[in-house]
Image (cartoon, rainbow, N blue to C red):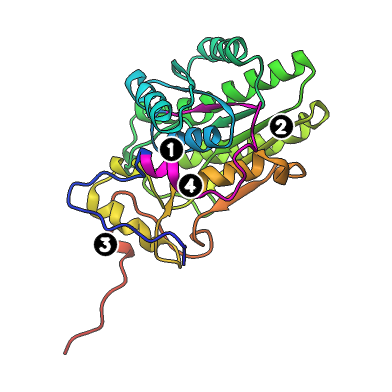
């Protein structure tokens, strides 16, 4: 079991770690690990992106975060200033817009003089039976989770090639290996990112660019607020450990791949899921009766 106790969840309590927890929870890496390096984290205003921003700051990195909700970005920025005494940069934009992505890269280089690691965490989905997807709903998820991630990857790689510098990309994906019922759109998009990453990790190896993915399982993060509470609570039973991971599990996986510990890793996926890949099912909208195991016969 995890050394981190599972917090009891009060009625109506939001999912995820507090700013104070992100700022003080013990880490497995030395504080100056990323001193002098710059990280760009998409979706950095909340959830896993916010946790990654906090941890990179705690390890000495310069950090730029981006996302569509400027108020959430500002909350993360102010929390890091108040609790860590560090200043980060923010850019309100959408990764669906390739021109906005290019402007974001320019702003990052202008602010910090370069970029060492891109963390593609931005994305989103909604639970629904695939047979009922609208064209608009399908395209929205594919455009953000796949196309937006690609725009970010390509823009970063082009800047590194232009400057003759190495680079590192970590894409936050999902456990797509056995399919993802009720979120088929994001399964398709994230599977695309996984194999896109494997492909360009080979193409871009001559440029000194490493590309890897982190695949979270059931994580106690703000992303669970998208689901009805009873269904979200059941996520803990989707793995043989029968518990949630937390945002630091994912943030420190990103650190591992971005630090010297990951220098000989590229084109791979680090799965952080409590064993869900081997055992367990996730039903974001609740398990259909068809798949429920009948109880013992009474008589």
Question: In this rendering, does residue 33 appear at all?
Answer: yes
Residue denoted by label 1:
185
What is the residue that sits farthest to the bottom in this orientation? 299
Residue denoted by label 3 = 289
As helix, strand or loop, the secondary structure at mark 2 comes to: helix
Mark 4–mark 2 Cα distance, whole angstroms, equals 28 Å
Magenta stretch? Answer: 20-44
Mark toward the start of the polypeptide (3 vs 2): 2
In space, the residues marked 1 and 3 are separated at their CA atoms by 22 Å
Please name which of the two marks, 4 or 3, marks the residue nearer to the observer: 4
Task: Give the Cα distance between marks 3 and 2.
Answer: 42 Å
Q: Farthest residue toward the right?
A: 206
Q: Is residue 240 left or right of residue 167?
A: left
x, y percentage for residue 124? 40, 33
Residue contact at pointers 4 and 2, CB within 8 angstroms: no
The local secondary structure at tag 4 comes to: helix
Residue at the (49%, 50%) spot, across then down: 26
Of the numbered discs in the image, which one, if any, rests on residue 248?
A: 4
Tell me if 11 is positioned left or right of 162 in this view. Answer: left
User: What residue is rendered at 25% in x and 77% in y?
Assistant: 295
Q: Which mark is residue 200?
A: 2
Compare residues 36 and 100 and report the one nearer the observer: 36
Q: Earlier in the sequence, mark 4 or mark 3?
A: 4
How many numbered dots are placed on residues in this image?
Answer: 4
């Amino acid at each position: 079991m995890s050394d981190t106790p599972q917090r009891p969840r009060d009625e109506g309590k939001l999912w995820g770690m507090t700013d104070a927890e992100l700022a003080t929870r013990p880490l497995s890496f030395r504080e100056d690990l990323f001193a002098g390096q710059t990280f760009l984290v998409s979706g950095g205003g909340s959830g896993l992106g916010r946790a990654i921003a906090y941890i990179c700051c705690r390890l000495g990195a310069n950090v730029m975060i981006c996302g569509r909700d400027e108020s959430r970005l500002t909350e993360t920025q102010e929390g890091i200033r108040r609790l860590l005494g560090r200043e980060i940069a923010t850019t309100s934009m959408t990764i669906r817009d390739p021109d906005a992505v290019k402007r974001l890269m320019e702003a990052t280089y202008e602010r910090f003089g370069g970029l060492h690691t891109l963390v593609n965490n931005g994305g989103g989905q909604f639970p629904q039976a695939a047979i009922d997807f609208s064209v608009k709903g399908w395209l929205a998820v594919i455009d953000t989770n796949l196309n937006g991630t690609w725009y970010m990857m390509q823009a970063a790689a082009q800047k590194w090639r232009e400057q003759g510098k190495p680079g590192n990309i970590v894409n936050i994906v999902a456990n797509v290996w056995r399919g993802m019922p009720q979120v088929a759109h994001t399964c398709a998009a994230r599977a695309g990112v996984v194999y896109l990453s494997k492909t360009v990790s080979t193409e871009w190896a001559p440029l000194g660019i490493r590309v890897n993915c982190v695949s979270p399982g059931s994580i106690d993060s703000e992303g669970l607020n998208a689901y009805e509470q009873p269904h979200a609570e059941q996520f803990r039973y989707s793995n043989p450990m029968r518990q949630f991971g937390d945002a630091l599990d994912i943030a420190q996986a990103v650190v591992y791949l971005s630090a010297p510990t990951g220098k000989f890793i590229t084109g791979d996926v680090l799965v952080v899921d409590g064993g869900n890949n081997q055992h367990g099912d996730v039903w974001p909208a609740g398990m259909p009766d068809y798949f429920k195991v009948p109880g013992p016969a009474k008589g």
